Amino acid sequence: GRDEGDGEEDEQEGENRCESACWYLKIRSKHALASLCFTWFAIMLELRQRGMQQERAVQDMTPTRSFLAILVISLSFLGVPHGATDHLVGDKIFKHSFPNTWLCVFVVVYLAMMGMVIASWFLAPVASLAAFLFLSVIHWGLGDTESDLVPLTLQPLEVLIRGSIPILLPSVLHQEAVSQIFSFLVGMHGDTSSVQSIVNGMSASMSFFIFGWAICFSYHLIEIVRYTNAKGVKDLKLTSKQTRHLISAVELASLTALCSLCPPLVSFMLYFCVWHSCRHILCVAASTFDNSRCIRALMKFGLHALPFTIATLLMAGVWYFKLEQTEWDQQGKQDSSTELKSTLKKFDALSQVIFVGLSAVTVPHMIVTELSMVRQRALEGNVDKVNQ
């Protein structure tokens, strides 16, 4: 038999070989650390602002034009590109059956699914909003959960809790602001009565969320202690499970603080662009292009994402200007200033473009992402396979 020291040496050697062969795990940990810095910077700014004013009125929750510009830029450079390489997975799905026309077939199928989702917003806007929120929880939770860190029995709970943080917490703790955003999405221009049932349902689920959050957070803490007792803290690396459990625990706590304290649009922008989109870009770049050279993989990703990113932004721009010209024509608000009405009008149009557009691509993007997640799980499980 082999003693415990030999086993630990083999495990360390396996991690070293995996780290040199695939950059994904190391860069994922570095990305999480950088994202934590952005997250806590935003939290500190929010706490400082709260200290300077005793209470924030509802009208103060209306985003400024400068913030809307930052949101659009962030979505343009990170949010949109993160889904602009879905056609690469379409290669694997359709190329065997349609060797010469697979790209056209993929685009037609993708656009058809998007069209069905957009049509549902016109036919049943409140039900479409509820479905969009639920699908977002699942999609974001799957992207944030590392399958090789969490046991199979705990993975559904981890997915649900992680995906709920950016949606459930702002909806419950910032109800007035979120209800206003939801009302824009369903075409009610600030009338929150139609979406109140969704917000009430989220509030009722908070007890389950808190219980599930405590289980997930405790699991990562227990694993940190277990690995520390077994290996100590010598030669600690970013790719070691000990470090990754620590990052996961801090990530859970930090995102919870972000989505609880910061305004909903701020927490959405930071989570969707800095956390979710960047993480997905790294995963696709490593699994699709080059898992041994990071810069080369990201450059290839950018080149492949550019055409569909430009096309998406052009369509979104046309949609936005059409909405801005037509919305609120019959909705004169005599009690609001001209500047406030103009900002709300832009926010109304932009909200529909961003969130209805996101819901339209969520269904096809989730299907494509789940197919590509097979590769991500293979990347994350490389350490374990090498150790065996």
Image (cartoon, rainbow, N blue to C red):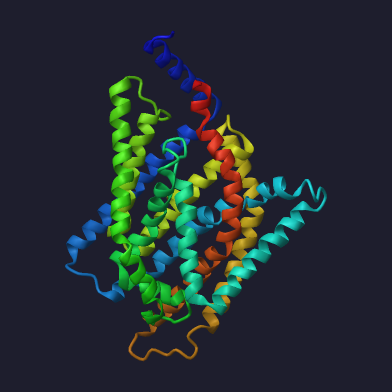
Placement of 10 over or under 353, stated as above or below = above
Q: Is residue 28 left or right of residue 368?
A: left
User: What percent of the width, then of the height, locates residue 283?
Assistant: 54, 41
Q: Which residue is more in the foreground, 70 or 184?
A: 184
> Splitting the image into 4 quarters, where does residue 294 fall?
top right
Q: Residue at x 44, y 8 (%)?
A: 1
> Splitting the image into 4 quarters, where does residue 357 fall?
bottom right
> Splitting the image into 4 quarters, where does residue 333 fall?
bottom left
User: What percent of the width, then of the height, locates residue 100?
Assistant: 83, 50
Q: Residue at x 55, y 57 (%)?
A: 80
Q: Residue at x 51, y 71 (%)?
A: 128
Q: Is residue 227 visible?
A: yes
Q: Which residue is more in the foreground, 234 or 146?
A: 146
Q: Is residue 350 visible?
A: no
User: What percent of the width, then of the height, locates residue 55?
Assistant: 20, 69
- Tally of marks: 0
Q: Which residue is more in the foreground, 42 or 360?
A: 360
